[in-house]
Amino acid sequence: MFTGIVEEKGQIKMIEQVSDNGIQLKIAADKVLTDVQLGDSIAVNGICLTVTTFTENEFQVDVMPETMKATSLASAVKGSKVNLERSMRVDDRFGGHFVTGHIDHIGKIIRKEQVENAMYYDIQMPRESMDLFIEKGSVAIDGVSLTIFAVDDDLFTITISLIPHTVSETILGEKTVGSIVNIECDMLAKLVQKQTRG
């Protein structure tokens, strides 16, 4: 379980193909490795991955074929920056929202606009996911806990607004129109949807 509060930006140092659709990633990091143990979970762009080996400044994870198909890691390249967050501790502050690290969809940025001190993004979603978004609801984009600013059911888009801190401290500030991002819908919204459909 995660909070969606990114701790640092890491960098992919190695991508090794281990099967047709499976890879190993080696990621350079600092803060998330201060207390790491084998088998720990680290969210990489919002994707919950398991640490298989580590050093003082790098860790390695396996990425299974299903994860490659369902997330933006399919387009990852050596040198790419990634958002990193350790799994939450019971005794820690909880500043974002409940994030599982299980990606529901990928979205595409179709607008990026600076409005005073905020950065607006319109993100286009699969049509079937739109029932899970409400204005002022929560969403995790590449592992970043955000509030939904607007929903357009006709264009299948949500709008998010980033403060300068989020722009500078996460990889979202480097995204451009056309970029693919990982989307995790709010867990409560998914539960309500399942109950009402049932």
Image (spheres, rainbow, N blue to C red):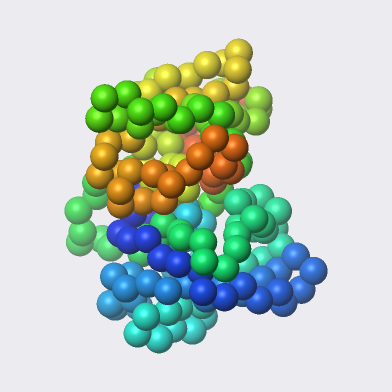
Tell me which residue sits at (28%, 77%) in the image: 34
Give x and y (percent) for residue 33. 33, 76
Relative to 157, is 34 above or below?
below
Q: Is residue 193 visible?
A: no
Q: 21 left or right of 174?
A: right
* Quadrant location of the N terminus in the rendered image: bottom left
Residue at 25% of width from left, 44% of height from top? 165
Q: Is residue 53 visible?
A: yes
Between 169 and 62, which is closer to the camera in this rendering? 169
Along the line of sight, the residue nearer the viewer: 82 or 187: 82
Q: How many marks?
A: 0
In the image, what residue occupies the spot 49% across and 84% down?
53
Q: Where 20 sits versus 113, above or below?
A: below
- Dividing the picture into quadrants, the one containing residue 2 is bottom left
Q: Nearer the viewer, residue 186 or 143?
A: 143
Left or right side of 178 for 161: left
81 relative to 157, above or below: below
What is the x, y in percent for residue 153?
Answer: 57, 16
Report the quarter where the C terminus lies: top right
Where in the figure is residue 30, as x and y percent of width and height? Answer: 32, 73
Identify the residue shown where x is 45% and y is 78%: 59
Q: Is residue 55 left or right of residue 125?
A: left
